Image (spheres, rainbow, N blue to C red):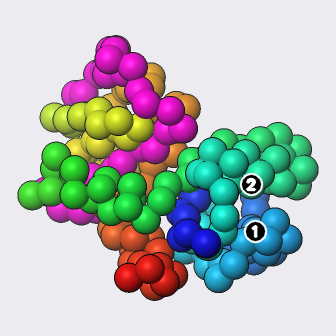
Amino acid sequence: MLPYIALIRAINVGGSGKLAMSDLKAICLKLGFKDVSTYIQSGNVVFRTEGSEEEVAARLDAALAEVLGKAPDVMVRTLAELSGVLHDNPFAAMEPNRVLVSFFSTPLPDDALNGIVAPDGEEAVVRGREIYVHYPIGSGRSKLKLPALKSGTSRNINTVVKLVGLAKDLDVSR
């Protein structure tokens, strides 16, 4: 059984997709996931299970659709992949709370940054299935427009660090 990290899109954001983390944990346990833990209220869950990340994402997405009325989109990463996200961070020298990583299910196209409007000096970099964005004035005050971000789910670097730590605690192969 491998440790996985699931990042669920549109959970407890802007009044939509309301789901208590205790309910998310219960759904994961019902799916047979082991050692389930959630982190903050934005749809982050760490667990161990068997199967590919695609299978795990599909199972969790379907179970959440039954509860929420529609599939929220679940991005699943292995511990190695999420550790790689930290390693590949092009903005590692910046304040971690001002760097967000947007996660996607599939690799992004070459034109993923087309249409970007960055009036406050924001910078964005695509790496595989992620877009890293540095927000010099913070994401809450930013006027950044980047159409590609709409289909992903974002976490700041501090959250990614915490999720990697939680997944490492489940990694029995270490």
Q: Which amino acid is tagged 2?
A: Leu
Give SS at disc 1: helix
The residue drawn where x is 46% and y is 44% is 103
The reply to whether the C-beta atoms of the residues labelled 2 and 1 are less than 8 Å apart is yes
Q: Is residue 25 left or right of residue 5?
A: right
Q: Which amino acid is tagged 1?
A: Cys
Q: Is residue 121 left or right of residue 50?
A: left
Which residue matches tag 1? Answer: 28
Q: Is residue 107 magenta?
A: yes
User: Looking at the picture, does residue 70 appear above or below residue 45?
Assistant: above
The residue drawn where x is 66% and y is 57% is 51
Q: Quadrant of the C terminus?
A: bottom left
Give the quadrant of residue 23.
Answer: bottom right
Q: Is residue 33 magenta?
A: no
**Circle on res. 60:** 2
The residue drawn where x is 83% and y is 54% is 63
Image coordinates of residue 139 in percent, x first then y, are 34, 48
Front-lying residue, 93 or 139: 93
**Spatial separation of the CA atoms under disc 2 and disc 1:** 7 Å
Most common SS among magenta residues: loop
User: Looking at the picture, does residue 54 appear above or below residue 33?
Assistant: above
Specify few, some or many for label 1: CA neighbours under 10 Å numbering under 14, 14-19, or 20 or more: many
Q: Is residue 42 left or right of residue 109?
A: right
Q: Which residues lie in the magenta part?
A: 94-120
**Circle on res. 102:** none
* Visible residue check, residue 27: no
Specify few, some or many for label 2: CA neighbours under 10 Å numbering under 14, 14-19, or 20 or more: many
